[in-house]
Amino acid sequence: MSHIYLYSPSSAVRDKAAFRRGVALLKRLGHEVEIDPDALRSHMRFAGDDETRVAAITRAAASGADVALITRGGYGLTRILPTLPYRQIARAVDKGTQFVGLSDFTALQCAVLAKTGTTTWAGPALGEDFGAETPDDIMLACFDDLLDGHGEGSGWRLPVRDLPALARRLPARAATPTDAEEGPSLHIRKATLWGGNLSVLCSLVGTPWLPAVRNGVLFLEDVNEHPYRIERQLTQLLEAGILGRQKAVLLGSFNRYKPVPHDRGFKLQTVVDWLRSRLKVPVLTGLPFGHVPTKVLLPVGQPVDLLVEGRDALIFWG
């Protein structure tokens, strides 16, 4: 049994039914669930005013829980980054508390990494994932691996269209297919894994809260953003020199946007192709992470190996 502390550092919880389902599921799984006293607080669009949410994060760090899990993302963390309890969060992680979340949580993760070098986990949120009508089995298994200390990596299957693009970005020897149908191989060693939500990450450019990661593996996802907006944000990271300083860029899910008639063929794959034309480093797609039911957990700030053999990709940190 694990001790899970639930708190709300960003937007207010609006879907109370999903909140209750998530709590009930965690309890059925045998966990001790502790709910922050302000988890359901509401102030404008936020889960309490700024001071309330900073206090909730501080309580999460002091809880002694195995996992401090956000109830939801939304918006609110970027405005309180200067006042977060960074030392307390780092000490809590050192003592065994894993901070887990996604979306707006990217701001806290990046700031904690920039200020302390501490690892946090990109992963599920209570309402969206544990409170879903049918929680995803892979997400649950990855979360169990984190609790059990058995998680050593995450793998996925690359889309076929990634293979030619990957081969063009590799040295001739590395790009030689081991199997005519499977494609090239790639091995990146001991690169810092970091990233998260693209919009949030872009909002940190030029601030002290963006980690100065070089030769890392950067993963990105977003939701409700049209491909042209995704391209515009990637352009910012590109022109700021951030993308070119990495060893690889991994793209997760970009979903819940609506194409419009005047797109005239401009789509997400257009953006991926454009990005690859501007970068010398590999750009891989299909990472199972983002605002989707099936998501892996990723250690933000942890050195990892990235292995690709044909269509099989693996991020390994064990």
Image (cartoon, rainbow, N blue to C red):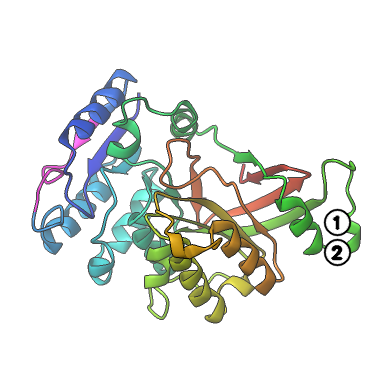
Residue 211 in the image, given as x and y percentages of width and height: 47, 70
10 Å crowding of disc 2: few (<14), some (14-19), many (20+): few
**Coordinates of residue 12 in the picture (x, y in percent):** 16, 50
Q: Is residue 52 above or below residue 246?
A: above
Question: Which residue is depicted at the point 69% across and 71% down?
Answer: 277
Question: What kind of residue is marked 1?
Answer: Ala
Q: Label 2, label 1: how many angstroms apart (C-alpha)? A: 6 Å
Looking at the rendered image, the quarter that the C terminus falls into is top right
Question: Which disc, if any, is residue 191?
Answer: none
Quadrant location of the N terminus in the rendered image: top left
**Residue under the image location 72 percent in, 56 percent down:** 188
Q: Is residue 34 magenta?
A: yes
> Dominant secondary structure of the magenta stretch?
loop
Depth check, front residue: 298 or 86: 298
112 or 219, which is in the foreground?
A: 219
| Element type where label 1 sits in the image | helix
Tell me: residue 24, above or below residue 4.
Answer: above
Q: Looking at the image, do the residues carrying marks 2 and 1 touch, with CB atoms under 8 Å apart?
A: yes
Residue 98 found in image quarter: top left
Q: In the rendered image, which residue does mark 1 sit on? A: 175
- The structure residue drawn at horizontal position 54% and vertical position 63%, both measured from the top left corner, is 266
Q: The residue under label 2 is which amino acid type?
A: Pro
Comparing 138 with 115, the one in front is 138
Name the spot of residue 75 as percent of width and height, x first: 25, 59
Give the magenta range.
Answer: 33-42
On whether residue 215 falls in the magenta region, the answer is: no
The reply, left or right, for residue 168 in relation to residue 27 is right
Residue 260 x %, y %:
42, 59
Provide the residue designation for mark 2: 171
| Looking at the image, residue 235 lies above or below residue 23 | below
